[in-house]
Image (cartoon, coloured by chain):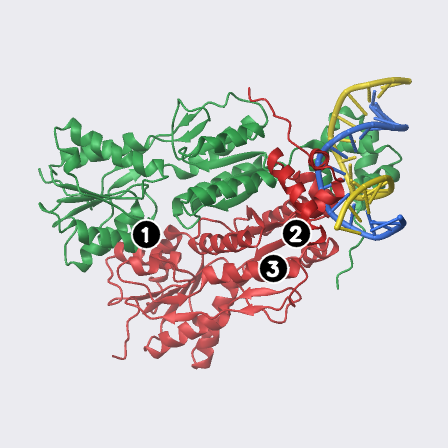
Chain colours: A green, B red, C blue, D yellow
Amino acid sequence: MSELRDVPTLDDVARAAGVSTATVSRCLNSPERVVEKTRNRVMIAVEALGYTPNFGARVMAAKRTFTIGAIIPTMENAIFARGLQAFQEELHARGYTLLVASSAYQPKIEEEQIRSLVARGADGLLLIGHDRDPAMYEYLRSRSIPVLSAWVYLPDSDQPTVGFDNRGSMRELAQKVIDFGHRHIALISGITQGNDRAAARLEGLRDALRENGLDADAVPVIETPYEIESGAQAFRTLMQSDPRPSVVMCGNDVLAVGALRGAREMGLSVPEDVSITGFDDIELARIVTPQITTVHVPHREMGRIAAQTLIDIVEKRGNGASVELKSSVQIRESLRDLTA
Amino acid sequence: MSELRDVPTLDDVARAAGVSTATVSRCLNSPERVVEKTRNRVMIAVEALGYTPNFGARVMAAKRTFTIGAIIPTMENAIFARGLQAFQEELHARGYTLLVASSAYQPKIEEEQIRSLVARGADGLLLIGHDRDPAMYEYLRSRSIPVLSAWVYLPDSDQPTVGFDNRGSMRELAQKVIDFGHRHIALISGITQGNDRAAARLEGLRDALRENGLDADAVPVIETPYEIESGAQAFRTLMQSDPRPSVVMCGNDVLAVGALRGAREMGLSVPEDVSITGFDDIELARIVTPQITTVHVPHREMGRIAAQTLIDIVEKRGNGASVELKSSVQIRESLRDLTA
DNA sequence: CTGAAAGCGCTTACAG
DNA sequence: CTGAAAGCGCTTACAG
């Protein structure tokens, strides 16, 4: 079918310009080291032949791919889609390309993907969260692949992190809930196993309860996948608790939307009969009725800064320090003030 | 900081196993061509040394990267996030890795990204829609890079497509709208320039109008970016039309959610005062109140089949034929039956 | 500032 | 079935 037109090589360009391949290579990679006259001649030949460097050869000789890998739980969650979009844009702005894989929240799959992206020559890796087998970090270190953990902020970890304080944010939201007079609190959490963000949010809730002299262990908690239907189902179960919760807090907005649906199906009004809170502040949180009280997380900014930080490390600039982003509690209709 | 432990090469494995590098290479790439005894010895050495093939060298020698590139408008639209997730999963199942770039619906940026992914050694490319500069297709053909256009179904195009009939789907939805007694129809369209899906949907509406003896040119149309706020604004403008529309059809669900918001802000009830329709059937369409009448598109399936089809072409299996997926009209609360 | 040449680590005809 | 060797197309010390 399609004939492969002979793709020009460095050699062809060198010959056409009457210089050595070394000079052509320099014109392309460090033009300031070639005198202008020579450079012009070379560039004209490059244009004329439509030359593009051969990727494999370049990678092999330079030992770099200008490719960054990212492994996220799933692109179907808007927070990762948004963060990854910003991450990719920033990568592109700095001359890097994005390699993407997903783990479906499964540590085993994530390990496989890490090895796969490393085998594909990723110059650096973006991972979500920081809780994983130390052997994985050891493996990456042995191959000198920089890693950045995002969606968490852990200033004391060995690797850099770019994210926010999941625990503190949830604690802050829970404090508001308590301030609003709620005493019977239930939680629909994401699966905490292998998900340090979910685990931290649960701990944040417990922190707030303890600080207010409430029994942190008495709180009904259901762990369930981040799906609307799972949220609806967990909500129905939690509403059977005795005493019945006056507020159902959720590990993220997707679960909160599910809880909202559960309430509707049970014929309960939100927030009159029961309050609901979320986490993340995805678009959905403001679109549903009632609008959901949640924690705003700057996902785009997180993706952008993660890209900058990671590239700085790959290029051995910057100090590789962790960056903390600020989240903020957004009080909306779905949370009732019982003291009012 | 981290010392680069010497990464073992093919040579090291060959020496350890007492065979040539050719044999080690064969054990890894076509094991059936090596006798079992030798193969075992080699595999033990591979394990012992923790050998992983060097990516650049392999690419250069084999002239393949086992990497597929995808360029989508934006991951922030749930339809692309979902399709891309399925695409990536299928790629992974077949031993390929995904390179992702985004175009923000800008042909210029898309061209740049195509060149960038080709330069990164993509073995094949997934693009959205099919309407682009012929020179781009010529460029890809000259480099023997297979391309697949998704989200459209064009059986007569030179390149394979995997998608659905945008025009026919919109025509079908519009027919329902007309059957329901609506005569004053308005459209909030995506930007049709450089977006053949948006253009096809507009044409589909016109088809239906003509077929029912209505004036296709009299329909008020506003083209606007796929953003909720843009949809709300367009809705407010369209409701000033004389005669006032009884239904505002939208180019996708995001715009429809915006229209819904616009209606709420104007104090209009949907569908009592005005009907609204969308396109795509993203989760949002069933979450909002009232639920949105829309066209269901099998995004995950499209991503999965696109991956299979593209890999088959890359590996020179299959015939590279286009695949049509079925969409279906979903009648929900947001469309009022005026004949009832 | 520029060139000759080694070297990066694989794969793959070609022999045997 | 296995090996010796060429070759893939760059980059980069090293000279000059």
Q: Residue at x 17, y 49 (%)?
A: A238
Q: Are marks 1 and 2 in contact (CB under 8 Å)?
A: no
Nearest the camera: B215 or A141? A141
Q: Are marks 1 and 3 in contact (CB under 8 Å)?
A: no
Q: Identify the residue position indicated by label 2 in the image.
A: B123
Q: Are marks 3 and 2 in contact (CB under 8 Å)?
A: no
How much space separates mark 1 and mark 2, taking CA atoms? Answer: 35 Å
Task: Give the residue type at disc 1.
Answer: Glu
Q: Residue at x 49, y 57 (%)?
A: B191
Q: Residues within 10 Å of mark 1 (few under 14, many from 20)?
A: some
Task: Give the residue type at disc 2.
Answer: Asp
Q: Identify the residue position indicated by label 1 in the image.
A: A227
Q: Residues within 10 Å of mark 3 (few under 14, many from 20)?
A: many
Task: Give the residue type at disc 3.
Answer: Leu
Q: Residues within 10 Å of mark 2 (few under 14, many from 20)?
A: many
Q: Residue at x 24, y 54 (%)?
A: A232
A273 lies left or right of A46 = left
B233 lies left or right of B47 = left
A71 w.r.t. A236: above or below: above
Question: SS at mark 2?
Answer: loop
Residue A280, by quadrant, is: top left
To which chain does the residue with label 2 belong? B
Whether residue A99 is visible: yes
Q: Position of residue A201 (x, y in %)?
A: 28, 36
Q: Position of residue A307 (x, y in %)?
A: 51, 34
Q: Identify the residue position indicated by label 3 in the image.
A: B310
